[in-house]
Image (tube, helix red, strand yellow):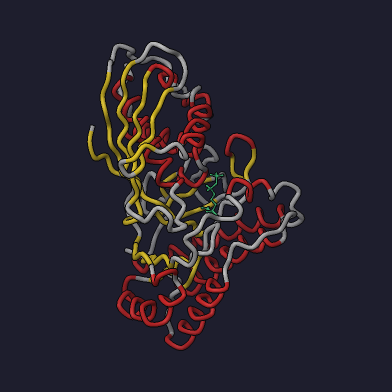
């Protein structure tokens, strides 16, 4: 597929109004996307677990209008929200060519998250994927030809990517690959459900998110990606991501949990190493992030455990572990890690199946 193939050509303009509602999950990358080209094209492939509990729920109400500008209102958790508008305006500008009915309607966007707003959990992946899915449902009802499920999800992921890169991995489950590579079926334009073999060791994999720092990040992902331009280690890093994806594919098939731990933790630390070695350099980890990492290493060593950590672009720690260690690891988190979280706050989650239509 090329980008042009996603342009909606024939549609029925006589639909006056309607509404649609989707819920869409967050995701956690195992191989990290860090660095992008123009038009949200990733510099390297990434793969993520789709989550279950951390979700955005978005209702989109559309009403035909006469003027030809973009027109939308945003309500977050029931209250009108101006702060989200610029990001949505940029999203609309990027996707307009593919969704030509955008200027024909006024949109009321009502959105909320299942996780606390100021938790430091990026809501852009779940938020942008939920909005992209709502727009796709409208497209489906206006389209004069039948839109297959495959085409629907592919374009939803394509649109979500233009909102936020990692959002393209939040449409389906349980593992999603994004970015051209030699090991899996893939595209730079949208995420694809990983269809390789996955050992039962990875069934219902657990992710407990330790909320170390709930504040606003000092450096946004968008700025961080840009700092990979001219980064002294960029090319080696991009090559490493390809290599790690090939290795992870073999690990997923064989059920090699120790191999999984090595790749996933190395990816997390490499991501942060890229931040620390860019110009300007920055550090998003906090002292408690490091305390937690050391505790996890000690626990793993002493208990013959396969628990490991990963990080996204922030100080929070995702604790990943197999379902059969759920009881023991949760005890460890409660007893030894919760103290390092802001107000002792953490969120228990696990791998999920992707977004769901709530109302059409
Ligand atoms: C560290 O998808 O938030 O979480 O495309 O600029 O919106 P934009 O960036 P974003 O970057 C996420 C980076 C990451 C790694 C990952 O999810 O793969």
Q: Residue at x 36, y 14 (%)?
A: 65
2 lies above or below 273: above
Could you say where residue 339 lies in the image, as x and y percent from the top left? 43, 77
Residue 351 is left or right of residue 277, and the answer is left
Residue 353 is left or right of residue 45, and the answer is left
Quadrant containing the C terminus in the rendered view:
top left
40 lies above or below 333: above
360 lies above or below 304: above
Q: Nearer the viewer, residue 136 or 105?
A: 105
Quadrant of the image occupied by residue 188: top right
Q: Is residue 350 visible?
A: yes
Q: Residue at x 52, y 63 (%)?
A: 311
Could you say where residue 218 lies in the image, as x and y percent from the top left? 60, 55
Q: Residue at x 46, y 75 (%)?
A: 340
Residue 148 is left or right of residue 92, and the answer is left
Q: Residue at x 60, y 66 (%)?
A: 269
């Amino acid at each position: 597929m090329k980008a042009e193939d996603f342009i909606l050509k024939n549609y029925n303009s006589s639909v006056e109004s309607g509404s649609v509602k989707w819920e869409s999950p967050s995701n956690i990358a195992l191989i990290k996307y860090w660095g992008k080209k123009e038009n949200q094209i990733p510099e390297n492939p990434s793969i993520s677990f789709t989550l279950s509990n951390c979700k955005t729920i978005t209702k989109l109400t559309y009403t035909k209008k006469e003027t030809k500008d973009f027109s939308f209102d945003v309500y977050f958790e029931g209250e009108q929200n101006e702060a989200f508008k610029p990001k949505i305006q940029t999203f609309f500008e990027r996707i307009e060519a593919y969704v030509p009915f955008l200027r024909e309607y006024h949109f009321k966007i009502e959105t909320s998250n299942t996780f606390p707003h100021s938790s430091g959990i990026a809501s852009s992946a779940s938020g942008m994927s939920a909005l992209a899915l709502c727009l796709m449902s409208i497209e489906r009802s206006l389209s004069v030809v039948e839109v297959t499920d495959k085409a629907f999800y592919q374009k939803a992921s394509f649109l979500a990517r233009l909102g936020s890169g990692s959002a393209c991995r939040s449409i389906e489950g349980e593992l999603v690959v994004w970015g051209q590579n030699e090991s899996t079926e893939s595209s730079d334009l949208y995420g694809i459900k990983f269809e390789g073999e996955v050992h039962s060791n990875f069934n219902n994999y657990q992710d407990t998110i330790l909320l170390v720092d709930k504040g606003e990040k000092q450096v946004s992902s968008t700025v961080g990606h840009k700092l990979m331009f001219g980064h002294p280690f960029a090319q080696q890093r991009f090559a490493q991501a390809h290599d790690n994806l090939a290795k992870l594919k073999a690990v997923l098939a064989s059920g090699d949990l120790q191999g999984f731990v090595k790749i996933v933790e190395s990816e997390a630390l490499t991501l942060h190493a890229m931040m620390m070695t860019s110009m300007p350099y920055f550090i998003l980890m906090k002292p408690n992030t490091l305390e937690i990492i050391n505790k996890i290493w000690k626990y793993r060593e002493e208990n013959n455990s396969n628990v490991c950590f990963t990080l996204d672009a922030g100080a929070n720690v995702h604790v990943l572990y197999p379902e059969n260690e759920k009881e023991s690891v949760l005890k460890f988190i409660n007893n030894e890690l919760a103290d390092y979280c802001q107000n002792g706050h953490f969120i228990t989650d696990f791998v999920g199946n992707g977004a769901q239509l709530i109302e059409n």
